[in-house]
Image (tube, coloured by chain):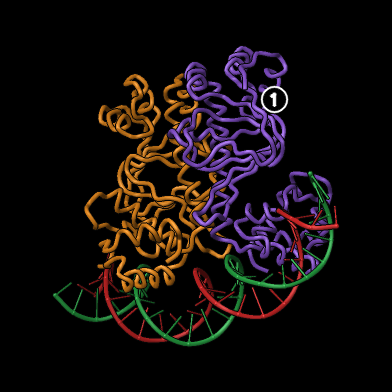
Chain colours: A purple, B orange, C red, D green
DNA sequence: CGATCAGTTGACAATACTCAAATACTGTGG
DNA sequence: CCACAGTATTTGAGTATTGTCAACTGATCG
């Protein structure tokens, strides 16, 4: 982990949604305080309660942010991919991280130390507005997650997620789960057994066709109505 | 609803957590764009999808922010009391409100219009940092809510909530639910029948004593362990 | 090739929801 | 101040969804 000043990093920072539109001058400032970190698949990045001395951007790879219950069950809060950030909450709210973060793949992260970063934000309102937008966006996602968890049964949550992936991937009626089914279960707030059963059920009922991690939507209309109403 | 410039409003704004520590000069700016709105109990403040032309602070009264499922079940996201704010997400993230807001009591709100407010924030990094802290705080609460909804059963969520209220109210072993039991059920992601049964069960098991909306914690230790482990 | 891990399936248990009905409470108009 | 209407709360009985436990298959990786 070492401070960094090269041009490619500056360009990369400017391409992230967090720093989109930030002036070059400030991007250079950012790159001046950034440290690039490598971490291996399954490596722990931080744990609940760890002091939040800074936050991260994902340069390459993927990271999962999750909560653990005392008996070891996990609930994934989100999966962070290239260009996205995580851990900002600890920087602005309090001291400690409210969740755990682990690399899903061998990854390269950009770490931004708290104090230096706050100093930059204080001096640059545009940066602050970008951050406000990013946090608001995340809040919106969490709102939807709470909605789904409390108002919909697992089939409804799964249907909504499949449609989300399909939309994001924009490849006709096909989509890829992007996660192991075990991890997907955790993201949907359920367990692998239940997910497995519901996937088969959706296939038998003609909503989808399953081939490993690849899914084809065979009855979009009914899948949409399942996602919306949460019931068959 | 009319723009406002009086000293009492400035002082009040400076006492909210959102604008705590903001310089007087900027508080005057804020009060210059603020509109005070009255609304009656049960009045709708905004609905999902409404354009987010600004956000609100609660001056007097209380407001609930909630999601509705297609078949009318509600999940309360939070209850906003005096000095707290809601609706900021729409201001910074997108255009529209992601949830519904309704007054729980006759209330007086302070409305801050989006464009004027964003202009003020752009010119004042300290304001931006306060907002970042507030949004981060809310994100942290939502994190806990997602955790509770997905990892704990209703008794665990209820126990955690009772301890939260007890801590907040700081009156020995006593606490008040602050909401009707129906509303509390919605906040905990369940239904009134289930809540009622679990409250009686906790009373029979000696955890608490119930008198309408007033609760006495009679076995804190077991209540804490229920809140932590989510199981009896 | 053995070991570990992901995924699937079955039998079962448990938690929480639905529906229904009885009771208590609140606020309003007479 | 009382009666009434509309809510809120509680309780019961039945059902449904999902979680638990266990066994088995198949893939992946040293």
Q: Nearer the viewer, residue A61 or A231?
A: A61
On what subunit does the disc labeled 1 rest? A
- Quadrant of the drawing holding the N terminus of chain B: top left
Is residue B214 visible in the rendered structure shown here?
no
Q: How many labels were placed on the picture?
A: 1
Q: Mark 1 points at which residue?
A: A15
- Residue A62: x and y, percent? 69, 38
- Residue B229: x and y, percent? 45, 58
- Quadrant of the drawing holding the C terminus of chain B: bottom left
Q: Is residue A39 above or below residue B42?
A: above
**Label 1, residues with CA under 10 Å away: few <14, some 14-19, many ≥20:** some
Q: In this view, does A76 lie above or below C29?
A: above
Q: Nearer the viewer, residue A107 or D4?
A: A107
Query: Relative to D22, is B38 on the left or the right?
Result: left
Q: In this view, does A94 lie above or below B220?
A: above
Q: Which of B223 and B106 is in front in this view?
A: B223
Query: Relative to B166, is B46 on the left or the right?
Result: right
- Residue C1: x and y, percent? 85, 57
User: Looking at the image, which residue is at 68% across and 64% down?
Assistant: A193
């Amino acid at each position: 982990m070492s401070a960094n000043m090269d041009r490619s990093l500056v360009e990369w920072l400017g391409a992230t949604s967090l720093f989109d539109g930030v002036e070059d001058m400030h991007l250079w400032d950012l790159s001046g305080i950034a440290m690039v970190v490598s971490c291996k698949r399954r490596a722990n990045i931080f744990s609940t309660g760890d002091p939040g001395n800074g936050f991260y951007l994902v340069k390459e790879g993927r990271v999962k942010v999750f909560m653990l219950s005392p008996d070891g069950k996990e609930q994934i809060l989100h999966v962070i991919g290239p260009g996205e950030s995580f851990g900002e909450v600890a920087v602005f709210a309090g001291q400690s991280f409210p969740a755990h973060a682990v690399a899903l793949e061998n990854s390269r992260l950009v770490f931004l130390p708290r104090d230096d970063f706050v100093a930059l934000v204080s001096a640059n309102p545009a940066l602050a507005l970008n951050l406000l937008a990013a946090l608001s966006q995340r809040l919106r996602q969490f709102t939807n997650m709470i909605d789904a968890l409390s108002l919909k049964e697992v089939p409804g949550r799964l249907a909504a997620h499949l449609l989300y992936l399909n939309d994001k991937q924009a490849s006709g009626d096909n989509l890829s789960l992007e996660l192991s089914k075990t991890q997907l279960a955790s993201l949907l707030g359920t367990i692998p057994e239940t997910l497995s059963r519901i996937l088969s059920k959706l296939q038998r009922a003609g909503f989808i066709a399953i081939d490993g991690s690849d899914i084809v939507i065979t009855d979009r209309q009914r899948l949409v109505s399942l996602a919306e109403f949460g019931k068959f």
